[in-house]
């Protein structure tokens, strides 16, 4: 195994299991880290700070699937995803026996993978599902994508993918626009409703003033 990849997995295992100077993460600690249960029932994703020699380190928490309760994904220098599975046994984390606990490189689909209404290029299936859930929650600002001006299809692509020459998977249009998902400030629903009521009230006052000028007192 690549030395940097091995060191990255060792770092994550020390985070989970702890060491002489610090305790490991409990299931409750992990749930707080990924934001469970506030974000629904999809896979919860938390990206750890960058580690030397690898592109990304992510924790995927599946609260509804005891077989895949926690997946650690590390993206190596070449952009390949490597996975390791863990389960909480009530006291500590354990690695499932057999193939489900083995370290393996996952196959990234060559073409765009459709999840929901969008397509994802260069992402492993579980990563695409997590990104689609983040998009629906409005929590994926800065994500790069291609937009088809003909049918408005969006193809989100990973930094390790090459989107050059890609045609729209929906209508076949070869001319796609490069876009970046703009970040939007998420407002409290009550504040948004109050602002909308204020805009309507101002519009109504302007309409009444216009009618008075036209029709007279």
Image (spheres, grey):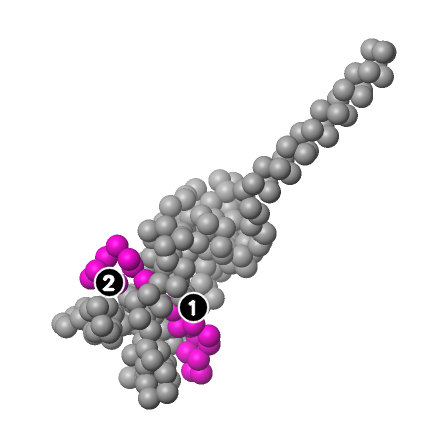
User: Where is residue 166 shown, x and y percent of the image?
Assistant: 45, 55
Quadrant of the rendered image containing residue 68: bottom left
Q: Locate residue 99 relative to residue 48 in the image: left or right.
A: left
Q: Tell me if residue 63 is in the magenta stretch.
A: yes
Q: Which residues are magenta?
A: 47-69
**x 53%, y 57%: residue:** 141
Residue count near mark 2 (Cα–Cα under 10 Å), binned few <14, some 14–19, many ≥20 = some
Is 49 situated above or below 187? below
Q: Which residue is more in the foreground, 8 or 179? A: 8
Q: CA distance from mark 2 to mark 1?
A: 18 Å
Residue count near mark 1 (Cα–Cα under 10 Å), binned few <14, some 14–19, many ≥20 = some
Q: Locate residue 150 relative to residue 1 in the image: left or right.
A: right
User: Where is residue 210 shown, x and y percent of the image?
Assistant: 80, 20
Q: Tell me if residue 16 is in the magenta stretch.
A: no
Residues at circles 2 and 1 in contact by the CB criterion of under 8 Å: no
Quadrant of the rendered image containing residue 73: bottom left
- Under tag 1, what secondary structure? strand
**Can residue 69 be seen in the rendering of this structure?**
yes
**x 26%, y 54%: residue:** 64
Residue at the extreme left: 98
Query: Does label 2 or label 1 sit earlier along the sequence?
Result: 1
User: Where is residue 144 shown, x and y percent of the image?
Assistant: 52, 58
- Under tag 2, what secondary structure? helix
Q: Locate residue 188 relative to residue 66 in the image: left or right.
A: right
User: Where is residue 21 shown, x and y percent of the image?
Assistant: 37, 87
Residue at numbered disc 1: 47
**x 85%, y 11%: residue:** 217
Residue at numbered disc 2: 68
Q: Which residue is more in the foreground, 77 or 34? A: 34
């Amino acid at each position: 195994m690549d030395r940097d990849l091995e060191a990255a997995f060792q770092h994550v295992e020390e985070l989970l299991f702890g060491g002489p100077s610090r305790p490991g993460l409990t299931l409750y600690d992990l749930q707080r880290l990924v934001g469970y249960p506030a974000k629904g029932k999809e896979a919860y994703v938390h990206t750890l700070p960058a580690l030397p020699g690898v592109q990304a380190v992510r924790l995927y928490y599946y609260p509804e699937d005891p077989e895949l309760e926690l997946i650690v994904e590390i993206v190596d220098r070449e952009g390949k995803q490597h996975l390791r599975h863990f389960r909480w046994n009530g006291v500590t984390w354990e690695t499932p026996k057999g193939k489900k606990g083995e370290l393996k490189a996952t196959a990234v689909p060559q073409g765009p993978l459709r999840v929901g209404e969008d397509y994802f290029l260069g992402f492993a299936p579980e990563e695409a599902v997590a990104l689609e859930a983040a998009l629906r929650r409005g929590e994926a600002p800065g994500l790069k994508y291609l937009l088809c001006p003909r049918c408005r299809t969006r193809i989100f692509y990973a930094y390790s993918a090459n989107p050059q020459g890609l045609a729209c998977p929906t209508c076949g249009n070869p001319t796609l626009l490069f876009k970046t998902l703009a970040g939007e400030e998420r407002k409290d629903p009550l504040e948004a409703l109050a602002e909308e009521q204020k805009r309507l009230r101002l519009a109504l006052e302007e309409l009444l003033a216009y009618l008075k000028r036209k029709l007279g007192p």
